[in-house]
Image: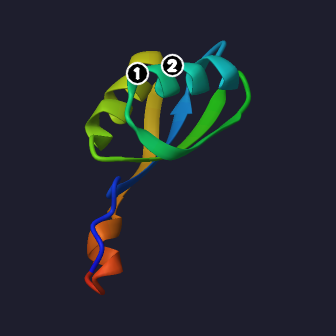
Amino acid sequence: MEELEFKFDTQLLIDGHDLSEDAINDYITEHFIGDCLLVVGDDTLIKIHFHTNEPWKILEYGQSIGDIYDVVVENMQRQQEGLQG
């Protein structure tokens, strides 16, 4: 089975104030390694979806700009191998 470059599908919601999709997208792109980045929402609620090998860094960043919840981290490598992710 092929090894995935980025094995953790990381998703979370951020509740905050004066949040900016563009600023969050730019920060993640500049500071974290991964792919399939999606940042959507408004100035009080943002959803992030990101594939990375270091999901804890995304969670720490999210918590630094607001209150995170609905956190999902799935191991896509295990899923690819037919195991529970």
Q: Tag 2: Cα neighbours inside 10 Å, few (<14), some, or many (≥20)?
A: few
The colour scheme used to paint the residues is rainbow
List the residue tagged with mark 1.
Answer: 31
Q: CA distance from mark 2 to mark 1?
A: 6 Å
The amino acid beneath tag 1 is His
User: Where residue 24 appears, x then y in whole percent?
Assistant: 57, 22
The amino acid beneath tag 2 is Tyr
Quadrant of residue 21 within the rendered picture: top right
Name the outermost residue toward the bottom: 82
List the residue tagged with mark 2.
Answer: 27
The tally of labels here is 2
Q: What residue sits 62% from the left and 34% below the top?
A: 46
User: Where residue 31 appears, x then y in whole percent?
Assistant: 40, 21
Tag 2, which secondary structure? helix
**Quadrant location of the N terminus in the rendered image:** bottom left
Q: Is residue 43 left or right of residue 66?
A: right
Q: What residue sits 39% from the left and 17% below the top?
A: 64
Q: Tag 1: Cα neighbours inside 10 Å, few (<14), some, or many (≥20)?
A: few
